[in-house]
Image (cartoon, helix red, strand yellow):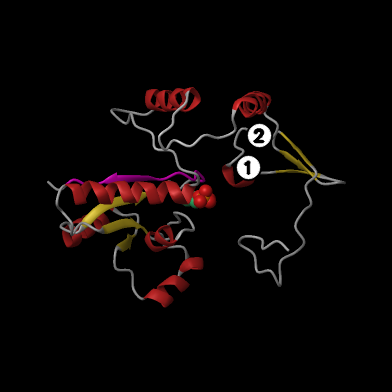
Amino acid sequence: MIWYPYQQMKTMKDPYEIVDANGVYLYTKDNKMIDSVSSWWSVIHGYKHPVLTQAIKDQADKFAHVMLGGLTHEPVRRLSDKLADWLPGDLNYCFFSDSGSVAVEVALKMALQYYMNQGERQRTMTLSLTHSYHGDTFKTMEVGDDEDYHFVLEAFGEKKYAVNIPTEIPALEEAFEKYHDKLNCLLVEPLLQAPAECACTTFPS
Ligand SMILES: Cc1ncc(COP(=O)(O)O)c(C=O)c1O
């Protein structure tokens, strides 16, 4: 049995059985349809992209995966260098993780450790926007404000380490005034359909 995500299993309709995919199209046995969410944005260049498919095949013939704990390799260095060239300013270091939720967790841990290293142990508060979604892991559920996860608040009580504010400058100013000595970072994701997020460490003036 498969437990499908974001569905009530008792009432969900039968999922489409996909037998092939190409470009923006998904194929069932009898029909084709446009995948307008690119399998939750993980196939944004389209299915069977010839360059990507070839690169995956070439790399799999050498090694599909090698961890970065104590090891390194040329493809990961090449990707980091490309990202560093593309990113602004001195954002030159890449930390690789395995999903959107874990990327947010990593960013939150980095921001927290920065202040711990500075001796500011009280800076544990994350600011983020109302209705924001940052992922499905426990900490990302806590810092986000997705209604589907409000049951977590019922279980654990009011949020202690996260505050959600509306997307308005006065709300941001008010939060800075109220929590300035506790603030650790501001977590932002675009309001357009662009599932990306960044954690910006706030530096006290
Ligand atoms: C804005 C945003 N943040 C975080 C995530 C979580 O990413 P993942 O499902 O890879 O853990 C998603 C996933 O859709 C997302 O849209």
Find residue 68 and report its horizontal and vertical position in percent: 44, 35
Q: Residue furthest left?
A: 205
Q: Residues within 10 Å of mark 2 (few under 14, many from 20)?
A: some
- Apparent side of residue 171 relative to residue 167 in the rendered image (left or right): left
Query: Dominant secondary structure of the magenta stretch?
Result: loop
Q: Is residue 133 above or below residue 20?
A: below
Residue contact between numbered discs 1 and 2, judged by CB atoms under 8 Å:
yes
- Mark 1 falls on what kind of element? helix
- What residue does disc 1 label? 38
What residue lies at 41% left-to-right and 23% top-to-bottom? 81
Find residue 132 and report its horizontal and vertical position in percent: 42, 57
- What residue does disc 2 label? 46
> Can residue 189 be spotted in the picture?
no
The kind of residue on which mark 1 rests is Ser
Q: Residue furthest right?
A: 30
Q: Is residue 122 above or below residue 67?
A: below
Q: Is residue 14 magenta?
A: no
Find residue 176 and report its horizontal and vertical position in percent: 20, 56
- Apparent side of residue 173 relative to residue 189 in the rendered image (left or right): left
Magenta residues, as a range?
A: 193-203
Q: In 3D space, how far apart are the residues under numbered discs 1 and 2 (Cα atoms)? A: 7 Å
What residue lies at 15% left-to-right and 47% top-to-bottom? 118
